[in-house]
Image: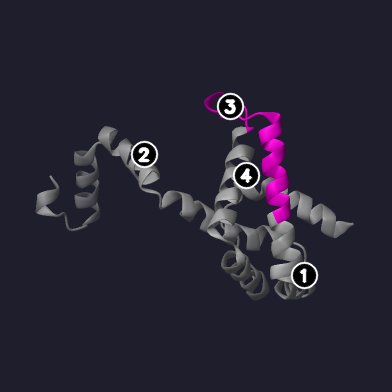
Amino acid sequence: MKLRHGLVAFLAVFACAGPAAAGVYADTLGKCLVSSSSDDDKIALARWIFSAMSANPKLSDMVSISASQRDALDHQFAQISQRLLLKDCRKETVDALKFEGDSIFEKSFAVLGEAATQEVMNNPDTQAAVAKFANYFDNQALLDLEKEAGVPVDAGAK
């Protein structure tokens, strides 16, 4: 029963989890999760994370995801997770659970979450959207800060 609660707790915090220090077995499991995941799996995971994050009332006004869409994303993520943990990376999962306990879910899936995020961020449209904030950033203040820190400033940067 504790394992089930650990997995459920992982799912509840996964989208918000920061980098977690992983033991060697959780790290090995994380690498297996990434290498066993297709690009489509990673996009499905990123969509699930996006959906989960958008449930936060402070973000929910920015998107419209129906209950049936959320349910479909939950189902898809459950299927991918089951395949990865119970089939594709079964040995790594068993070893990680045996030697590091059920905290390995959060730690190893954080590695997969990073890969999923990278998959999304590598898209040229996403990169262009991310870069738009620079239109509003005070570059001179940044150059002044770099100068104060003793960082060599490129003469062509001004």
Residue range of the region highlighted in magenta in the rendering: 55-79
Three-letter residue code for mark 3: Ser
What residue did someone put label 1 on? 97
Of helix, strand and loop, which one carries label 3?
A: loop
Q: Check the picture and name the quadrant holding the N terminus.
A: bottom right
Q: Secondary structure at mark 4?
A: helix
Identify the residue at horizontal 22%, vertical 57% (top origin). Answer: 151
Tag nearer the camera, 1 or 4:
4
- Apparent side of residue 31 relative to residue 85 in the rendered image (left or right): left
Q: Which residue is mark 2?
A: 129
Q: Nearer the viewer, residue 97 or 32?
A: 32
- Position of 130 relative to 85 (above/below): above
Measure the alpha-carbon separation of dots 3 and 4. 14 Å
Q: Residues within 10 Å of mark 1 (few under 14, many from 20)?
A: some
Identify residue for label 4.
48
Q: Position of residue 93 (x, y in %)?
A: 73, 70
Type of amino acid at the residue the image marks with label 2: Ala
Under tag 1, what secondary structure?
helix
Residue 143, placed above or below residue 95: above
Magenta segment: does it hold 63?
yes
